[in-house]
Image (spheres, coloured by chain):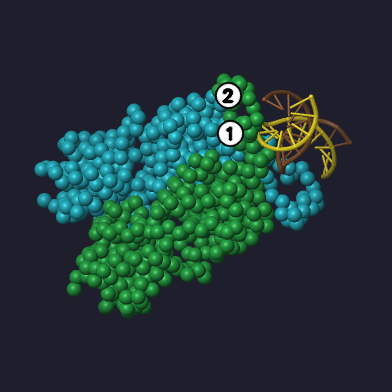
Chain colours: A cyan, B green, C brown, D yellow
Amino acid sequence: MSSPERVSVRTRERIDQAIAATGYTLNQAAQSLRRQRAKTIVIALPNVGNPFYSTILDAVVMEAGEHGYGVLVANRQPDDPIEWLRDYFFSSRADGLVLFDATLDAPALQSQLAAHGDVPFVVVADEVVEPFLNLVTSDNYDASRRAVQHLVALGHTKIGHLSGPQIGHYRNERTAGFIDAMKANDLKLCDDWLMRGNHVASSGFAAAENFLRMTNRPSALFCANDEMALGFISRVHQAGLTCPQDVSLVGFDDISMAEFLSPPLTTMRQKRNELGRLSTEALISLIEGRRKPQPPFRATLRCELVVRGSTAPPCS
Amino acid sequence: MSSPERVSVRTRERIDQAIAATGYTLNQAAQSLRRQRAKTIVIALPNVGNPFYSTILDAVVMEAGEHGYGVLVANRQPDDPIEWLRDYFFSSRADGLVLFDATLDAPALQSQLAAHGDVPFVVVADEVVEPFLNLVTSDNYDASRRAVQHLVALGHTKIGHLSGPQIGHYRNERTAGFIDAMKANDLKLCDDWLMRGNHVASSGFAAAENFLRMTNRPSALFCANDEMALGFISRVHQAGLTCPQDVSLVGFDDISMAEFLSPPLTTMRQKRNELGRLSTEALISLIEGRRKPQPPFRATLRCELVVRGSTAPPCS
DNA sequence: CTGAAAGCGCTAACAT
DNA sequence: ATGTTAGCGCTTTCAG
């Protein structure tokens, strides 16, 4: 019975009593079958083990729960990720998708899902993906500019960048922001100082090897995420140099540990809770038809610079 | 059709063709309803955001996926956690539970679930919970002893301990292992050196405040997890002391970042992947009746000491 | 080996 | 305001 209003108060009471007495619970499987709605969403992550994603997952689960939705985690992709995601929906296991993986070909997925009855999905990514997709993102470009600005304000002129990977043909927003900020400040972009990592600590470690071999080193580095900054500091310390005396470092994300690193990490905080909450809320509105699919849902969250010990004026 | 053998090869072929042609996908909701099986398990975590749990979640999702099971994440508990978990099962949303939260009253949950048709569940916890429950755990007691042994071997005699919280009336295995190892080595247990934290970095930070105020400080500290060790180091460095010169530190877990801390953290590695995989495998066996509920499934995984830079012989 | 039919528990539509 | 019924898509049983 879905219309509580259609029944008299007295009957309602008797029903409630019976429910309490017998311990009745609605059978979700039957309801799903009948309603063609699973009250479940899927969240697809490239890697749950990553502390950045897990906090978001937290927020997604919270928000979904408040709307009575369960959250299925889809962690890794087999050979054909799109095929695999399709299954969740065509088998009516789930009503929608929060996609945290720009390495998936979102437009292709879109057309796949549309072919079988338009499953709504929301992308959470750093890149500004196709404008017809629902997207929640941070102001990566602008945040990166502000990160550089912070270093410039401290007096740095020799600034390097450790970027994340290039995703498909999308513009890497953080790298773009870095480059434009350097140009805006008339600072030289040295090719050697533009390094590429893949968002894990070991790639920061490797970049530091590089850094240490340089004869002309930058006095500051803007890292595209905190984990790479962590790896970088690790190697630098190992070589007997110290941060921020020998090199200032700005990270990105503000993972929970950033505050407790040595030195505490200056970083651009992403509102990860908001990313998770907002995307889930939008998805559920879409599923329940409260929001029209056109125009696409778009949200950009502002990042916030958190100044800690890893940045200081240059030493020379 | 569930018995592929009952049909002739030729018919089978025709069926497969039809499937390919029409893009048929099995409707999970209907199957669940008919079979009274959701092919879904629930994983209950105290906090997904914690990097320790998220890696395990990773493994659980993997293993479940290989058996065709989906994984629902149940993150936080409302007022009555047991009531709330019950719902997943009585509403036939899920067939079993991996419970990563010893703060839940597992025996009470057990009886609740048994009342409504015996939902199988497996507990993953550090404490040795009731022997009639299915449990996957690490050899926490023994691992802690070995952690102390490592410090003793380096020449430490003044050893402190930063413990995790006390869960219900269970014995804190790591603290017990620490105490027994100290006794076995005829080392003095100083009350001041026995501190309590709650597994988050800030509690390690707070413990270090304490440490710094001591007139007679231990030369080494065994922390019940890596995050507390991180917080501890952070505060100690801030005070101008260094690790391991002024204090040696052993952590527990070997979270992915431990290797990249400054100094790299010596720690007891838990096989978190195994914890996740094994518990899920056992749960699915239980669900599918391949394993009999009696005797309970019990597994204890050995931890492994990973020696890095945060431990050294005492300096004086 | 194949076809037919009942029914899992629910909801929406219709009848009273 | 309440009662009845058909049918969601599947599996299982029973008949051919």
**Residue B20 vertical position relative to residue A51 in the rendered view, above or below:** above
Percent of width and height locating residue B26: 60, 32
Subunit of mark 2?
A: B
Percent of width and height locating residue B197: 40, 67
Numbered mark located on residue A91 in the image: 1
- In the image, taking residue A36 as reference, residue A300 lies left or right, namely left
Mark 2, other Cα within 10 Å: few <14 / some 14–19 / many ≥20: few
Subunit of mark 1?
A: A
**Which element carries disc 2, helix, strand or loop?**
helix
| Amino acid identity at mark 1 | Ser
**Residue B5 vertical position relative to residue B201 in the rendered view, above or below:** above
Numbered mark located on residue B255 in the image: none
Q: Is residue B192 visible?
A: no
Where the N terminus of chain B falls, by quadrant?
A: top right
Residue occupying image coordinates x 51% and y 58% = B298
Percent of width and height locating residue B27: 62, 33
Percent of width and height locating residue D3: 85, 41
**Residue B222 vertical position relative to residue B49 in the rendered view, above or below:** below
Residue occupying image coordinates x 39% and y 66% = B142
**Which element carries disc 1, helix, strand or loop?**
loop
Nearer to the camera, A247 or B165: B165
Where the C terminus of chain B falls, by quadrant?
A: bottom left
| C-alpha separation, residue under disc 2 versus residue under disc 1 | 17 Å
Circles 2, 1 touching at the beta carbon (< 8 Å): no
Residue occupying image coordinates x 31% and y 36% = A165
Nearer to the camera, A74 or B284: B284
| Amino acid identity at mark 2 | Asp
Report which quarter residue B238 is drawn in: bottom left
Location of mark 2 (residue): B16
How many marks overall?
Answer: 2
